[in-house]
């Protein structure tokens, strides 16, 4: 808490004030009955079990054993050398881990190479929107997901958010890259490493007094329902926003974009009978899982402040500052979520962005001519590019490491 400004805490007061009122019925514990039909999943059928009570048993037990044996530092060192989809696993990994990783690095039988290629080209062409939506939009949504905000805050990475965002972006950029699932790409590597990180977190967070005191009764974090909640803040939200922004998208592109995220969900350890098989199934699952759990938390407000502060710093100096970043974040997620995240109001910039963003998108898509784009749009465009570049280059220097402790202190 020491690195947080008191001013921001005061600004966030509105959002925080509502937490007490929500009390026991806080969104962290609000769950509706599971009615989503497995017939709408990529598996096409399933037992209909509620993913709130499903985790990733095999991975979780394995990481429990690795943590107990004190193998994490050695494993991390070896895994740093594993960087390409087609690369053999490093020699010297513990045998149980090696066997698990050999299994979990395989693409599912339903993965379709042609669709993955279409998705890669689509992702590249729409990189600016996707990085903004996944990075800033998805980030602002995830801090308004109480379980995720608390898990992130109380885990090891919560103490260094710049590093943490760069690590998370590493997977995002891997998914969006042209070679994502090609042999030289990195998507399989980053997804499998993330699966291991989550499994370690499931073992570690239950030992954190900060987490157990705020988990709303959840005994083990990151259930598959939680995973799906976050998944919807990525492709489901991004597709919805691109449609809202009238980005031209063919049926083949939309299907392919869903597919790349279905494959990624599988590699992250989400069961096939929970992975939406169509956009309609994704939307209905998102309504059931994501919408009811969004809400304010102290941790979410604190994390949002750090994230937006970093964003302003990276896209500066000179060209842009915190009020613009605040307004852009609000534009991406809407007033309700922005208020829950404690994002301050910025009347001037909010109007400027509302006016400038649609013509900027229309111009980029070749739908209008340059003179119709307000000058201010280029400030936003440049800031977005700087943000992407910053995390792209930072991402190259860092690795997804398995944590072996929680947030210190
Ligand atoms: C770590 C992505 C869901 C909590 C990570 C990392 C990535 C990632 C790439 C590695 C970065 C790092 O080590 O900091 C995703 C994706 C998800 C998802 C793509 C869903 C589709 C969730 C959920 C929660 C969560 C639902 C909690 C409710 C965490 C935590 C870490 C982590 C606590 C570890 C940070 C640390 O090392 O301390 N996630 N995540 N994630 N994730 Fe997730």
Image (spheres, rainbow, N blue to C red):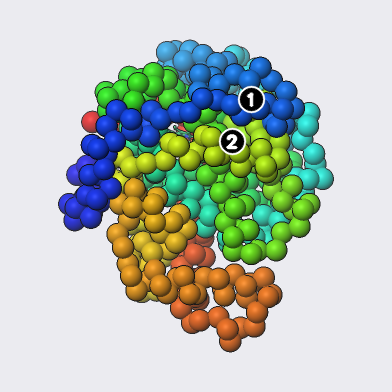
How many numbered circles are shown? 2
Disc 1 is placed on an element classified as: loop
Residue 175 pos. (x, y %): 63, 46
Quadrant location, the C terminus: top left
Q: Which residue is drawn at 29% across and 28% down?
A: 24
Q: Residue 285 carries which label?
A: 2
In the image, 153: left or right of 173? left
- Residue extending furthest toward the bottom: 371
Instruction: Name the residue tied to disc 1.
Output: 271
In the image, 44: left or right of 135? right
In the image, 160: left or right of 97? left
- Closest to the observer: 304 or 103? 304
Q: Quadrant of residue 105?
A: top right
Residue 394 pos. (x, y %): 47, 52
Residue 342 pos. (x, y %): 30, 51
Q: Which residue is drawn at 67% across and 42% down?
A: 280
In the image, 60: left or right of 112? left
Q: Which mark is residue 368?
A: none
Of the residues tagged 2 and 1, which is closer to the observer?
2
């Amino acid at each position: 808490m020491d690195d947080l400004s008191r001013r921001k805490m005061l600004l966030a007061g509105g959002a925080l004030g509502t937490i007490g009122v929500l009390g026991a019925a806080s969104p962290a514990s609000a769950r509706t009955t599971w009615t989503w039909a497995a017939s709408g999943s990529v598996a096409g059928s399933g037992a209909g079990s509620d993913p709130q009570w499903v985790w990733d048993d095999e991975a979780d037990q394995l990481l429990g054993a690795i943590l107990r044996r004190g193998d994490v530092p050695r494993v991390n060192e070896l895994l740093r050398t594993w960087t390409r989809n087609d690369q053999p696993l490093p020699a010297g990994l513990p045998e149980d881990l090696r066997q698990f990783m050999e299994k979990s690095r395989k693409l599912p039988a339903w993965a379709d190479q042609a669709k993955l290629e279409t998705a890669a080209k689509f992702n590249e062409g729409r990189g600016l929107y996707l990085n903004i939506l996944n990075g800033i939009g998805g980030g602002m949504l995830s801090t308004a997901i109480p379980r995720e905000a608390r898990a992130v805050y109380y885990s090891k990475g919560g103490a260094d958010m710049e590093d943490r965002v760069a690590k998370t972006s590493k997977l995002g950029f891997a998914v969006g890259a042209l070679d994502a699932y090609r042999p030289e790409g990195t998507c399989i590597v980053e997804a499998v490493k993330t699966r291991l990180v989550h499994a370690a977190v499931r073992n570690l967070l239950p030992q954190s007094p900060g987490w157990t005191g705020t988990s709303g009764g959840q005994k083990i974090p990151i259930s598959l329902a939680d995973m799906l909640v976050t998944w919807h803040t990525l492709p489901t939200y991004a597709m919805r926003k691109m449609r809202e922004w009238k980005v031209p998208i063919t049926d083949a592109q939309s299907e392919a974009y869903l597919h790349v995220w279905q494959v990624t969900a599988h590699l992250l350890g989400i069961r096939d009978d929970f992975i939406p098989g169509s956009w309609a199934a994704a939307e209905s699952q998102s309504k059931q899982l994501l919408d009811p759990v969004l809400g304010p938390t102290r941790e979410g407000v604190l994390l949002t402040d750090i994230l937006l502060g970093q964003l302003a710093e990276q896209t500066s100096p000179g060209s842009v500052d915190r009020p613009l970043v605040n307004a852009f974040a609000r534009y991406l997620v809407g007033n309700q979520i922005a208020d829950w995240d404690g994002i301050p109001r910025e009347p001037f910039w909010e109007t400027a962005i509302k006016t400038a963003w649609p013509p900027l998108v229309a111009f980029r898509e070749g739908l209008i001519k340059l003179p119709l784009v307000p000058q201010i749009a280029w400030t936003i465009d440049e800031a977005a590019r700087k943000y992407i570049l910053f995390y792209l280059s930072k991402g190259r220097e860092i690795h997804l490491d398995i944590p072996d402790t929680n947030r210190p202190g």
